[in-house]
Image (cartoon, helix red, strand yellow):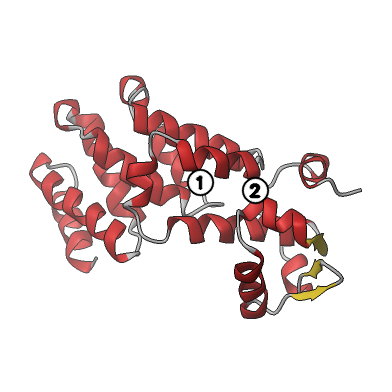
Amino acid sequence: QEKVLATLNKSRYSPEIIGDLEAHIQQQAAEQFYTFEANHALLKLYQMFPAKANASTIAVILTKALMNLPNTDFMLGLYIISDKLQTDSNIAALIDLHNLLESANFKEFWAKRASTEASGVIDGVKGFDDAIRSFIVNVLARTYKTVPVHAILDQTSLQRDALEAMAKTNSWQIERDVITFPQEVTEQNKAPVIPPFESLAKLLDIR
């Protein structure tokens, strides 16, 4: 990462560094780390030199950005991706997935994640599903003090044993098929992408 950032400081607007930045995003996908500055710089270079734009690499960048929700990295990247590139099947599929997450349609997200044209890209990015589940659970924990177990299972596409392991790791209480989140989590400020209470309540069938 330090080498790439040093390269950006020296030659940020040179097309000669595109290859190095493309290699760096593939390394991020394989090794489960994230360098927003490098990825955004590559998208900017693609904007400046459209003949060099690589739709497959852009799809990986957007996948990594999805994993960093609720931060706005995905939208910041999308703003500088051309309309033509946004029609690429993988990129368009990732935009659809992003919209589902932002609108808290989590169950539909998992259904589409399994069948999306971008599944090949997503499967090549280590830790994707875990990152999205973490985002979803954080949304729920910041919105509710308690959530029925069945609702969490539906919204995270987890099996019961995996959910129980997650609960143990995060010090959640499970009693009578209801999860209670720690007070320090529920009292945190809500992330900007969290939809209105009514939207989530309808999706989770919470009264």
In the picture of the structure, the residue carrying the numbered disc 2 is: 192
In percent of the image, x 33 and y 26: which residue is there? 88
Q: In the picture, residue 205 is in which quadrant?
A: top right
Label 2, secondary structure: give it: loop
- Quadrant showing the N terminus: bottom left
Q: Which amino acid type is marked by label 2? A: Pro
The reply to whether residue 190 is visible in this rendering is no
Can you name the residue that lies furthest to the top here? 84
Residue at left 68%, top 47%? 194
- The kind of residue tagged 1 is Thr
Q: Which residue is mark 1?
A: 72
Q: Residue furthest right?
A: 207
Q: Secondary structure at mark 1?
A: loop
- Asked if residue 116 lies left or right of residue 156, the reply is left
Cα gap from disc 1 to disc 2, whole angstroms: 9 Å
Residue 189 placement (x, y as % from top left) = 71, 60
Q: Tell me how many marks there are.
A: 2
Which of pointers 1 and 2 lies earlier in the amino acid sequence? 1
Q: Sort mark 2 into few (<14), some (14-19) or many (20+) by Cα contacts within 10 Å.
A: few
In the displayed structure, does residue 129 sit left or right of residue 109? left
